[in-house]
Image: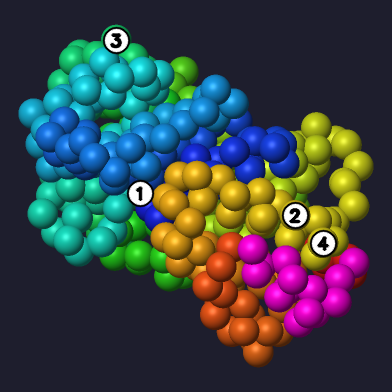
């Protein structure tokens, strides 16, 4: 599962585990200062985990080795088992100040940072990058062998450049070229895989050691189960019914209540409703009605009232 700010909290990660097929999951990107200097509610929520929430990587971002080392050491001292460095975030406020994908503009610095962070902890350190800053500077192939030499444990490559943001399509062949320039470091491919068919096509194209899925799993958290079956040559499961999806969403909401408190949970849960809307067979009007939820208890009743239930979700 891809790290996704605002989405991949422990409530969602445990839902993914329950539905099956997922291997490694990540926290959203964490700023070292939130970790080291923080404390309080926000840090507790970002770091909340569970014995069943494994394997879990903690992702950090920042513009300098010093800061990232502080974050990595803090995480190591506080029970993390894998550190991931974000070198792919395209947001202006992050990439614009030399963090996230900003590091792809200065690949030599990115390598120095990788070396320094790897040396600073005994935990495995992985990195997540894009193909480059823009199409004119596809640095991923230059970076990968240098990260490998630095002792980076695995590299995730999102097949877009920073300048693409989330537009266009992910370039799986370019990810495949990165796979071919490293010796043994596993390369995890990422971008636009949303179904078993896409996963099979992706694995044939890119030949990666692993596959990371982001947006597709927000809409269909059971996609890992389906993909794992397809990759193992097993027949597909029946698609879930809207009732199944309601049950899973309720489970997630319950955990969100524990994590954030009753009122904040329902407000945060609203952003999941458009994600689950296709699987819940919600038309726009019903989706908007569900977005008015003010109490967690209303979810199931309101959903039933609006839609009826028991239909099969189209794959
Ligand atoms: C809402 C949102 C939040 C994201 N947050 C992060 C993040 O915290 N760290 C990160 O490395 N990538 C982040 N990403 C990028 C995803 O991890 C992933 O690389 C991207 O969505 C492409 O994969 P996909 O096509 O499977 O969605 C985020 C993407 C979205 C849409």
- Please give the residue where the numbered disc 4 appears in the rendered image: 243
Location of residue 125 in the rendering, given as x and y in whole percent from the top left corner = 33, 23
Callout 2 touching callout 4 (CB < 8 Å):
yes
- Please give the residue where the numbered disc 3 appears in the rendered image: 122
| Residue at the image position 65 percent from the left and 36 percent from the top | 17
| Disc number for residue 130 | 1
**Magenta part mainly helix, strand or loop?**
helix
Quarter of the image where the N terminus is located: top right
Distance from disc 1 to disc 3, alpha carbons, whole Å, reads 26 Å
Earlier sequence position, callout 1 versus callout 4: 1
| Residue at the image position 80 percent from the left and 38 percent from the top | 229
Location of residue 300 in the rendering, given as x and y in whole percent from the top left corner = 72, 66
Earlier sequence position, callout 2 versus callout 3: 3
- Indicate whether residue 305 is drawn in magenta: yes
Q: Callout 2 environment at 10 Å: few (<14), some (14 to 19), or many (20+)? A: few
Q: Callout 1 environment at 10 Å: few (<14), some (14 to 19), or many (20+)? A: many
248 displayed left or right of 85: right
| Residue at the image position 56 percent from the left and 68 percent from the top | 295
269 displayed left or right of 281: left
Foreground mark, 2 or 3, reads 2
> Going by the picture, which residue comes out furthest to the top?
122
Secondary structure at badge 1 equals strand
Callout 1 touching callout 3 (CB < 8 Å):
no
């Amino acid at each position: 599962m891809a790290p996704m700010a605002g989405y991949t909290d422990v409530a969602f990660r445990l839902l993914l585990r329950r539905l099956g097929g997922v291997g490694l999951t990540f926290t959203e990107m964490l700023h070292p200062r939130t970790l080291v200097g923080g404390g309080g509610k926000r840090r507790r929520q970002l770091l909340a985990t569970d014995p069943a929430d494994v394997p879990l990587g903690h992702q950090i971002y920042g513009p300098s080795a010093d800061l990232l080392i502080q974050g990595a050491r803090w995480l190591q001292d506080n029970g993390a088992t894998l550190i991931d460095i974000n070198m792919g975030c395209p947001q202006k406020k992050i990439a614009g100040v030399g963090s996230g994908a900003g590091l792809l503009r200065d690949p030599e610095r990115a390598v120095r940072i990788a070396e320094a962070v790897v040396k600073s902890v005994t935990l495995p350190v992985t990195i997540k990058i894009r193909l480059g800053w823009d199409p004119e500077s596809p640095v991923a192939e230059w970076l990968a062998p240098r990260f490998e030499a630095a002792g980076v444990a695995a590299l995730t490559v999102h097949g877009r450049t920073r300048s693409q943001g989330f537009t266009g399509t992910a370039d799986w062949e370019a990810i495949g070229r990165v796979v071919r320039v490293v010796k043994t470091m596993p390369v995890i491919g990422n971008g636009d895989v949303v179904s078993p068919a896409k996963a099979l096509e992706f694995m044939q194209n890119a030949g990666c050691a692993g596959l990371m899925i982001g947006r597709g799993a927000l809409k269909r958290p059971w996609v890992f189960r389906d993909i794992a079956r397809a990759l193992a040559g097993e027949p597909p499961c029946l698609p879930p019914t809207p009732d199944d999806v309601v049950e899973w969403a309720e489970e997630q909401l319950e955990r969100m209540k524990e994590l954030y408190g009753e009122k904040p949970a329902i407000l945060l849960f609203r952003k999941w409703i458009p994600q689950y809307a296709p699987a819940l067979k919600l038309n726009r009007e019903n989706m908007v009605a569900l977005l008015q939820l003010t109490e967690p208890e209303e979810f199931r009743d309101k959903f039933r009232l609006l839609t009826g239930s028991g239909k099969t979700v189209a794959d």
